[in-house]
Structures are given as C-alpha cells and as structure tokens.
Amino acid sequence: MRAAAILPVKRFGAAKQRLSEALGPGDRAALSEAMIADVLAALQGSKVLERVIVVSGEPRVGALARLFDVALLDDATDRGHSEAAAIGVRAAIAEGWECVALLPGDCPLLDPLELDAAIAGLGDRSVAVIPDRHGGGTNGLLLRPPGLIEPAFGPGSRERHLRLAAEAGASVAAVEIRSLALDLDTAGDLSELLVALESGALAGSATARALSRIATLPITGSA
C-alpha cells in the first residue's frame, strides 16, 4: 500500500489565535514553526509513508519543506484546515497514492511507529479517525483510498468524520494514537505541553527550544 502524509499549515499570523492572551504574535509564530519542524522530523522516521505533502501559504514553511525534502503545495486562499487538506488529497489522487494520512502540524509528540501501525491496519475502503485528547475533535484522518470522504475538520469533527465514512459505505473506526492526542489550541493545551516538556518527552526538540524562549511561562489554563 503506497501511503502519503498531508500536512495543512496555516499562515503563522493566523495561527493559534486562541492563545493570543497568553502568547504574543511572535511567540505564537515561533512555536507554530517549531512544532511543524518536529512533526516533519517525526514523519521522516515512518517506515510506511513514502511521501509528505505540506499545504500552506506561509512563506516560512518553504524553508522547512526544503530542509526536510518534502513536497510543498501553495494554499493561496488560506481558507481553513479542511480546504487545505482537500488540496493535498486532490494532489495525492493525481499522483496515484493509495492511502493518505491527514495530520496536524501542532502535535510535536508524534511517534511515527504508532502512526505506521494505524496505517498498516487499514483495509480496502477504510477510514480511521484519530481523536484529540478531548475526544470530540480529529487530530488525524486516515483514508484508503484518499478521496473516500471529504475532510471536515473543526469542532465535533470526530463524529462528523465517522458519519461521513458510514454514509460512504466505508469500514470506519476511531483509532486512539496517544502521541497524536495533544494538539495546541488553548492555554490548557499549552499547559499540557509544558508538562510534556518538564517530563522530558520533548527533549531535544525544536518545540522544547521554542518553549524555553517564551518568557511568559509557566502558563495555566483549563484542560
């Protein structure tokens, strides 16, 4: 099974707006860039994925794409995560990939071996929905074939993706991947990321270096 990852990335100026009370725009941009670098580094360790496609209109992402030798598609309109994911899916279909993993750029704890196991478990006409730590969102969407359903991220997307897959007659399951459970949207998420930093889970990562430069830490917030 030939599999590719698709990574939609917002322009840094529009990213992490819900953290605006805790972090200034420069810190939000630096942290976003660092997390993307860590996700791309993790994906290099995958034994299953043969290609990584980044979809973004952010100029600084181009340097990361070159550094990690991944494909970069321009998202000129920057209309949202689902729309950027759809650009990547269309490219994957055109290139003949049999399976895609739609992944976020803000899950720096990603373990490629966990992701590989989930991809390897896909059958024909399968959808795997990887929930966030709260259970209602989607932090990863595995599609075989790539165009089986339209990506529909956002609040409540776990149930929405499960419903769309069932309506498409696909084999569908929610698959928990611990290293993809924590993404960064709120101050509570940032507090959890700081716990990971303190535990050593982020040791040596670009995210750890970015967090260490943020003068407002520690940050508290509801989980």
Image (spheres, rainbow, N blue to C red):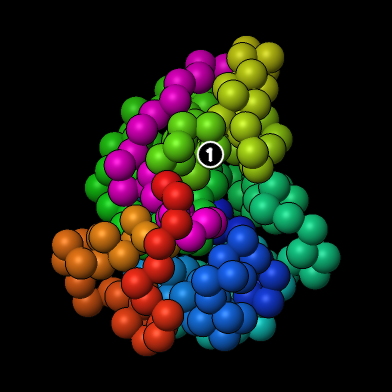
- Determine the residue positioned at 29% across, 37% down: 117
Horizontal side, residue 95 vs residue 150: left or right: left
Spot occupied by residue 106 in the image (x, y as percentages of width and height): 47, 60
Q: Amino acid at mark 1?
A: Thr
- The quadrant of the image that shows the N terminus is top left
Spot occupied by residue 47 in the image (x, y as percentages of width and height): 28, 51
* SS for callout 1: strand
Horizontal side, residue 131 vs residue 202: left or right: right
Instruction: Report the front residue among 152 and 132.
Output: 132
Instruction: Report the front residue among 33 and 31.
Output: 31
Spot occupied by residue 145 in the image (x, y as percentages of width and height): 57, 32
Q: Which residue is mark 1?
A: 138
Number of numbered callouts drawn: 1
Horizontal side, residue 152 vs residue 47: left or right: right
- Determine the residue positioned at 63% across, 75% down: 12
- Determine the residue positioned at 62% across, 32% down: 156
Horizontal side, residue 101 vs residue 24: left or right: left
Q: Is residue 64 visible?
A: no
Q: Quadrant of residue 108?
A: bottom left
Spot occupied by residue 96 in the image (x, y as percentages of width and height): 59, 45
What residue range appears in magenta? 170-189
- Determine the residue positioned at 61% across, 81% down: 25
From the viewer's perspective, is residue 113 above or below residue 163? below
From the viewer's perspective, is residue 5 above or below residue 71? above
Instruction: Report the front residue among 125 and 96.
Output: 125
